[in-house]
Amino acid sequence: MSATTLGRRDLLLASGAVLASAGAAAQAEEKSRHLEFMVVGAHPDDPETGCGGTMARLADLGHEVVSAYLTRGEAGIPGTPAEDAARIRTGEAERACAILGARPLFLGQVDGATEVNAQRYQEVRDVLSEEKPDVVLCHWPVDTHRDHRAAALLTYDAWQSLGRPFALYYYEVMSGHQTQVFHPSHFVDIGTTVQRKHEACFVHRSQRIEETYGNDHGRMEVFRGMEALCDYAEAFVLHPQSPGAPGLPGGPA
C-alpha cells in the first residue's frame, strides 16, 4: 500500500477530507468552497513546525485556517515568570499566524500543567462545536511530551462525542524524539510554501528554533519529501473513520 501525495492541484478535499483529487472538475468545485481547517497544537510553535507549510497552502487557496493553541507556552522560557513567558510566546504565535495566513485561537490551558478530565473535554468540545471546522489536524497521540498527548486526546474525544463531523488528521513533531511510531497515510508537497513555514517558525525567537531547525524539523520535511517524490513535504495520518475517507480517490494507505 502507498500513501497519497498531495500536489498543488490535489490539496483539497474530497468529501470534506483533506486531500486527493477527483479530477479537474471536482478540484475546481472544491477550490471554490470556503472550508475551515483547524490545527490544534499544545504550544505556540507546534502547529507551525508540524504543518506550517500546509497551513500556508490552504490559506493561499482561500480557506480559513485556525491555529488553536492549547496553552500559551507559560513554561517555555527558562528563568522567565509564567505570565511574562505567556505574553512573549502569545505575541510570537500571533506573528507566525500572520505570516501563514491563519487565525490564532487559545484554548486556555497552562503549559506544563495540561489536564485531561471531564471539564477539559467539554471545553474543547465546546470550541469545536462553535467553530464547526471541516478538517482538524492535531498531534499524533503517541508522543513523549505529555502536553502533546493531552492535545491529541482532547481533540479526539471532541471528534467522537460530536459524532465525527469533520475529517481528522494527525501530524508529527520532531519524530523519533517526540512523535513515535508515526506512519503517514498522506503527504502535502510544501515546496511553494516552505520558506514561509520557516519564517513563521523562526519568529518564535524565545524557543531558538532557527538554531536547531536543521537537525529536527528540517530533516523531517526533507525526508518526507523524499518519500513523496518532491523536495519538501509534510506528513499526516488520516483517521479512517473520517467523513468521506473510505471514498478518497487517491486511496488511503
Image (tube, rainbow, N blue to C red):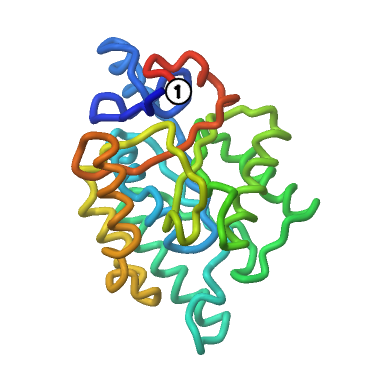
Give the tally of numbered discs.
1
Position of residue 227 measured from the top left corner of the image (x, y, whole percent): 29, 38
| Residue farthest bottom in this picture | 79
Q: In the displayed structure, would residue 226 be above or below residue 19?
A: below
For image coordinates 39% across by 74% down, the residue present is 207
Residue 206 lies in what quarter of the image? bottom left
Position of residue 89 measured from the top left corner of the image (x, y, whole percent): 45, 71
Q: Quadrant of the C terminus?
A: top left
Label 1, secondary structure: give it: loop
Residue 20 lies in what quarter of the image? top left
Q: Determine whether, in the image, residue 90 is placed left or right of residue 127.
A: left
| Residue farthest right in this picture | 118
Q: Determine whether, in the image, residue 21 is placed left or right of residue 75.
A: left
Q: In which quarter of the image is the N terminus?
A: top left
Tell me, yes or no, if residue 231 can be seen here: yes
Closest to the observer, 128 or 178: 178
Closest to the observer, 170 or 118: 170
Q: Name the residue under label 1.
A: 252
Q: In the displayed structure, would residue 99 be above or below residue 127?
A: below
Q: What's the amino acid at mark 1?
A: Pro
For image coordinates 28% across by 47% down, the residue present is 223
For image coordinates 52% across by 46% down, the residue present is 138
Position of residue 197 measured from the top left corner of the image (x, y, whole percent): 28, 54
For image coordinates 40% across by 52% down, the residue present is 50
Tell me, yes or no, if residue 192 can be seen here: no
Q: Determine whether, in the image, residue 180 is placed left or right of residue 233.
A: right
Residue 159 lies in what quarter of the image? top right
Task: Give neighbour class at mark 1: few <14, some 14-19, many 20+ (Cα, 10 Å).
Answer: many
